[in-house]
Amino acid sequence: MVDYWTYDSKKETGYVGLKNQGATCYMNSLLQTLYHIPYFRKAVYHMPTTENDMPSGSIPLALQSLFYKLQYSDNSVATKELTKSFGWDTYDSFMQHDVQELNRVLCEKLEDKMKVMNLVELL
């Protein structure tokens, strides 16, 4: 039997997961899928951000931060910065949203930022 309180996912699998903020399992599945697409992850890391960007107000910066934590953290990663960048409050995190709609909106926001540096061709 696995003791989930002491289970070390990073040690056992090489990966960490995402924390569920309430009803965000659909979003976590999408984010982990996108993270595991090498070209997508590379494009996210190369998106331009400025020193004035704050993760809670910038979807690209919040996603870069989330992907970085997924890559280097030893523990499961929170998605709160990213959901704040969507303009969601705690109530929104406890509502089930449509994953296809989230993917469409997320990709549109990222595409706008990627056009600045012709990163769209990476995808």
Image (cartoon, rainbow, N blue to C red):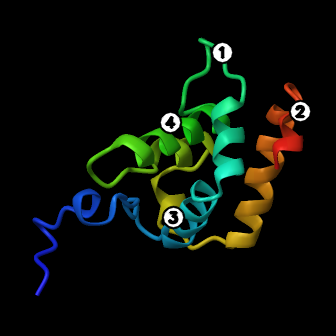
The answer to the question of whether label 1 and label 3 lie on touching residues, with beta carbons closer than 8 A, is: no
Mark 3 and mark 2: Cα distance apart in space: 26 Å
Identify the mark nearer the N-term, 4 or 2: 4
Residue with the mark numbered 4: 65
Where residue 2 sits: x, y (%)?
Answer: 14, 81
Q: Amino acid at mark 3?
A: Asn
Which residue is farthest bottom? Answer: 1
Mark 2 and mark 1: Cα distance apart in space: 16 Å
Where residue 94 sits: x, y (%)?
Answer: 47, 67
- In which quadrant of the rendered image does the N terminus lie? bottom left
Q: Residue at position x 67%, y 71% from top?
A: 99
Q: Tag 2's secondary structure?
A: helix
Q: Tag 3's secondary structure?
A: helix
Mark 4 and mark 2: Cα distance apart in space: 20 Å
Q: Amino acid at mark 4?
A: Ser
The answer to the question of whether label 3 and label 2 lie on touching residues, with beta carbons closer than 8 A, is: no
Q: Does 32 sit above or below residue 26?
A: above
Mark 3 and mark 4: Cα distance apart in space: 15 Å
Where residue 73 sits: x, y (%)?
Answer: 33, 44
The answer to the question of whether label 4 and label 2 lie on touching residues, with beta carbons closer than 8 A, is: no
Say whether residue 3 is left or right of residue 90: left
Q: Amino acid at mark 1?
A: Thr
Identify the mark nearer the N-term, 4 or 1: 1
Residue with the mark numbered 3: 28
Residue with the mark numbered 2: 115
The answer to the question of whether label 3 and label 4 lie on touching residues, with beta carbons closer than 8 A, is: no
Which of the labelled discs sits on residue 50, or is there none? 1
Label 4 neighbourhood size at 10 Å, few (<14), some (14-19), many (20+)? Answer: some
Q: Does 111 sit above or below residue 95?
A: above
